[in-house]
């Protein structure tokens, strides 16, 4: 029986608020919460951790992490992704099925689960493809896959264009209480685009997509959820114009949630500057007005979840002309310090941030973590929200180091990560 | 202001006085070309490689001739036929050529930003001969020189640019250059061929050609790519010619002494009427071609001076270190 006492902490409780106090963890779960001057009593053999006033929060649950196994293990493996997550305060990674081959059968899913259990120091929960090969033509074995441990179903950045097929998949998923996650981007309008249309796109001579493409796709999906009653999550809402539709859908009681990538909350289209391909994302970075509107939507709770959309790419796929270069950025290790930019800018408090990064994603997937409730798993992150540093991408634990924050000044460092009461961030190979 | 750059990648980073420096030298080369005066010592002992990842006849020939007139050893490579087909990346191709120690690389590439990327990886001078929809700086400079010689000035003119602006690097570089030199720029195109957010560049936007041409000093026509003609961006070639093709009737809305320009190659009967193109009183299309050689000579001359200066400094620094 192992017991850990965290004392002298600034507790960030997504359901309550901030308070000074501590936690007693026993056998991997939260046993008791302590008030400011409350005595922990006699705890024989307990490990005592003096948090020295730093923040203690439920570990981050990151939905939509790409671990490049199977297929492209040189970009990211379960070991490297797990170590990156631990270093970034992420205690649960929810993996994407856009691997090679796609995770679309129970057999491939079992391979992933086995590899993850063997190599990753943090929790790994796999998602599975909604359609076979993510081709948008035939639905996968949603029932078998769910039994095998798939926590959600998504074709990732591919949109199921055939409305009939998508509506059937949603209907079928509903009968199994399976969550469907969709990318919202009208495929015709966004074909070939690599930036958001507007002055910047025209200046650089790059093909752009109107922000309207996001709203159009969301509008279609909302109609389909209304029709089928399915549980639905929009992976990334990044534009102001999509927000009223989301707001209406929620008000009408549809089973809908939405997420946003940390990069869309902290960067805008101008960061691409001179064709910097590490800033090429999908959907593309938006105008500053959109960024601000989306930040506000997270603060108000309209957008539920912040994720890293961790997408490892090797140097070869990024060192190309902008249009040819691969999309995506790694984010497991920079999610928390980047999110703290919003805290330091006064746009969100820590409780709001951890609601969006830990509590809401856990709730959406029906997980017991993401909270400081008694009895919950002791998945915790201890961090100093003020510690400044200059990010050097060569220090990242990810195998791929395609971060847009290379050389950026960030504030906020992880001082410890625990999964089920076990310290994971110091584990070395 | 002297021109001290290492590369000519676009008009955007240039200061108006740098543009004037380039044009002044080009002006001199244009005159001397007419008188048959050669300058084979300017780039003597230097190697110029033309890398064209996209087909071009006139631009490549113009750069080749400019280099030869200045005495450079010129090599032209049709990149589509070579290593690209074998799967080599742009950067590897650049590094391979760089290892052969050329002095000047002239690059055209179908992707916006590709020439910038290449310039970061080599240690010679790079001239952008057109990258995707981004920039085509020597074209804008030759257009500017043509205008300056025809109109006697390069400021406070009303310039109408007409045609497929959305896909045109020529239009972008010209908008930059003419804007920096304080001209009034009008863009005329069907809305499907107009780039988004373009009014923010300080241009007036028209979809009616007659209104757009009213009182113009310069009418700059752009080429309409064949693949954009059928239904995708415009309904048909004949409807385009009817609404946006430059003929005598539409040209009559411009000033009486307005000049007509076209970067070539022309589609007669699509964007321009043949008789206008051939009208020696209005059309300066042949002059543009002539100025092209002079502008490229000037750009390579100035860049070569900067390259020599930089190499001299590096050699001196090495001596001090030794």
Image: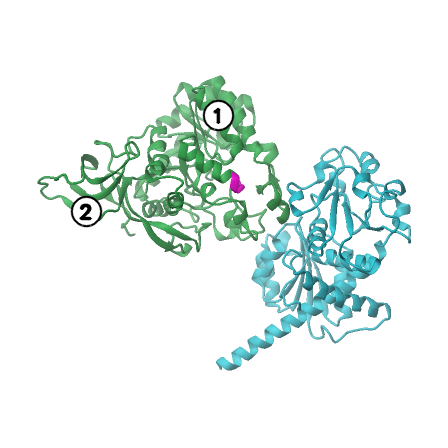
Chain colours: A green, B cyan
Could you tell me how far apart the alpha carbons at marks 1 and 2 are, in whole angstroms? 49 Å
Front residue of B46/B280: it is B280
Q: Are marks 1 and 2 in contact (CB under 8 Å)?
A: no
Q: How many marks?
A: 2
Q: Is residue A399 left or right of residue A321?
A: left
What residue sits 82% from the left and 46% below the top?
B215
Mark 1 closeness class: few <14, some 14–19, many ≥20 residues within 10 Å: many
Inspect this view and state whether residue B276 appears.
yes
Q: Nearer the viewer, mark 1 or mark 2?
A: 2
What residue does disc 2 label?
A49
Please say whether residue A56 is one of the residues in the magenta stretch. Answer: no
Residue B142 position (above or below residue B69): above
Say which label, 1 or 2, has the lower sequence index: 2
List x then y, in percent, for residue B103. Answer: 65, 69
Is B81 above or below relative to B65?
A: above
Q: Quadrant of the N terminus of chain A?
A: top left
Q: Secondary structure at mark 1?
A: loop
Whether residue B283 sits left or right of residue B229 in the image: it is right
Instruction: Find residue B140 and report its horizontal and vertical position in percent.
Output: 73, 55
Please tell me which residue is depicted at 64% across the width and 55% down the height of the picture.
B12
Q: Chain of mark 2?
A: A
Which residue occupies 21% across, 35% down? A29
Region rendered in magenta = A284-289
Mark yes or no: residue A205 visible.
Answer: no
At numbered mark 2, what does the secondary structure look like: helix, strand or loop? strand
- Chain letter of mark 1 equals A
Answer left or right for B279 relative to A5.
right
Q: Which residue is mark 1?
A: A139
Coordinates of residue A15 in the picture (x, y in percent): 29, 31
- Which residue occupies the foreground of this view, A341 or A256? A341
């Amino acid at each position: 029986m192992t017991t850990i006492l965290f004392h002298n902490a600034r507790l960030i409780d997504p359901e309550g608020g901030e308070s000074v106090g501590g936690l007693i963890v026993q056998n991997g779960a939260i046993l008791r919460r302590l008030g400011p001057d409350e005595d922990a009593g006699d705890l024989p053999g307990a490990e005592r951790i003096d948090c020295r006033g730093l923040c203690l929060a439920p570990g981050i649950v990151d939905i939509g992490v790409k671990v490049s196994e199977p297929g492209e293990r040189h970009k990211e493996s379960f070991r490297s992704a797990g170590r990156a997550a631990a270093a970034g305060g992420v205690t649960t990674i929810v993996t994407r099925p856009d691997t090679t081959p796609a995770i679309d059968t129970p057999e491939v899913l079992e391979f992933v689960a086995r590899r993850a259990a063997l190599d990753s120091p943090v929790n790994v929960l796999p998602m599975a493809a909604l359609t076979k090969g993510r081709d948008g033509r035939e639905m996968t074995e949603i029932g078998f896959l769910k039994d095998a441990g798939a926590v959600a179903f998504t074709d990732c950045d591919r949109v199921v264009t055939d409305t009939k097929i998508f509506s059937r998949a949603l209907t079928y998923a509903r009968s199994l209480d399976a969550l469907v996650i969709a990318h919202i981007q009208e495929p015709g309008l966004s074909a070939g685009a690599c930036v958001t249309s507007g002055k910047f796109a025209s200046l650089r001579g790059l093909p752009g997509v109107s922000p309207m493409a996001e709203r159009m796709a969301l509008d279609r999906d909302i109609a389909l959820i209304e029709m089928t009653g399915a549980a639905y999550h929009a992976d990334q809402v990044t534009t102001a114009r999509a927000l009223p539709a989301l707001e209406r859908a929620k008000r009408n009681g549809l089973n809908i949630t939405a997420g946003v990538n940390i990069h869309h909350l902290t960067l805008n289209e101008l960061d691409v500057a001179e064709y910097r391909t590490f800033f090429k994302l999908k959907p593309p970075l938006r105008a500053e007005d959109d960024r601000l509107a989306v930040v506000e939507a997270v603060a108000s709770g309209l957008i539920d979840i912040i994720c890293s959309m961790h997408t490892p790419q090797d140097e070869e796929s990024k060192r190309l002309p902008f249009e040819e270069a691969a999309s995506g950025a790694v984010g497991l290790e920079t999610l928390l310090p980047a999110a703290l930019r919003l805290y330091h800018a006064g746009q969100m408090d820590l409780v709001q941030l951890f609601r969006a990064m830990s509590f809401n994603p856990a709730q959406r997937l029906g997980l017991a973590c993401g909270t400081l409730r008694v009895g919950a798993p002791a998945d915790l992150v201890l961090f100093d929200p003020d510690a400044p540093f200059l990010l050097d991408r060569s220090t990242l634990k990810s195998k791929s180091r395609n971060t847009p924050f290379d050389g950026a000044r960030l504030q906020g460092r992880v001082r410890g990560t625990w999964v089920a009461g076990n310290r994971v961030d110091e584990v070395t190979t | 202001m002297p021109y001290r750059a290492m590369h000519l990648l676009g008009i955007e980073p240039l200061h108006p006085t740098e543009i004037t420096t380039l044009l002044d030298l080009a002006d001199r080369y244009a005159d001397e070309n007419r008188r048959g005066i050669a300058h084979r010592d300017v780039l003597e002992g230097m190697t110029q490689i033309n890398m064209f990842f996209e087909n071009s006849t006139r631009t490549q020939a113009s750069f080749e001739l400019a280099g030869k007139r200045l005495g450079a050893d010129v090599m032209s490579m049709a990149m589509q036929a070579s290593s690209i087909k074998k799967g080599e990346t742009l950067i590897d191709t650049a590094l391979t050529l760089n290892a052969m120690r050329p002095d000047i690389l002239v690059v055209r590439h179908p992707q916006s930003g590709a020439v910038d990327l290449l310039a970061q990886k080599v240690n010679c001078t790079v001239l952008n001969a057109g990258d995707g929809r981004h920039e085509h700086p020597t074209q804008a400079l030759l257009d500017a020189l043509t205008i300056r010689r025809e109109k006697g000035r390069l400021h406070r003119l009303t310039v109408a640019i007409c045609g497929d602006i959305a896909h045109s690097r020529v239009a972008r570089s010209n908008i930059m250059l003419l804007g920096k030199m304080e001209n009034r720029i009008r863009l005329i195109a069907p809305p499907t061929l107009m780039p988004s957010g373009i009014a923010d560049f300080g241009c007036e936007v028209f979809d009616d050609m007659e209104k757009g041409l009213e009182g113009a000093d310069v009418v700059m026509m752009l080429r309409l790519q064949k693949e954009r003609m059928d239904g995708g961006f415009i309904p048909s070639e004949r409807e385009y010619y009817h609404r946006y093709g430059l003929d005598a009737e539409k040209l009559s809305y411009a000033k009486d002494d307005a000049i007509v320009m076209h970067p070539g190659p022309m589609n007669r009967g699509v964007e321009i009427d043949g008789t206008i193109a051939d009208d020696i009183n209005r059309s300066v299309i042949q002059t543009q071609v002539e100025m092209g050689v002079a502008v490229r000579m000037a750009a390579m001359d100035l860049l070569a001076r900067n390259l020599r200066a930089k190499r001299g400094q590096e050699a001196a620094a090495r001596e001090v270190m030794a």
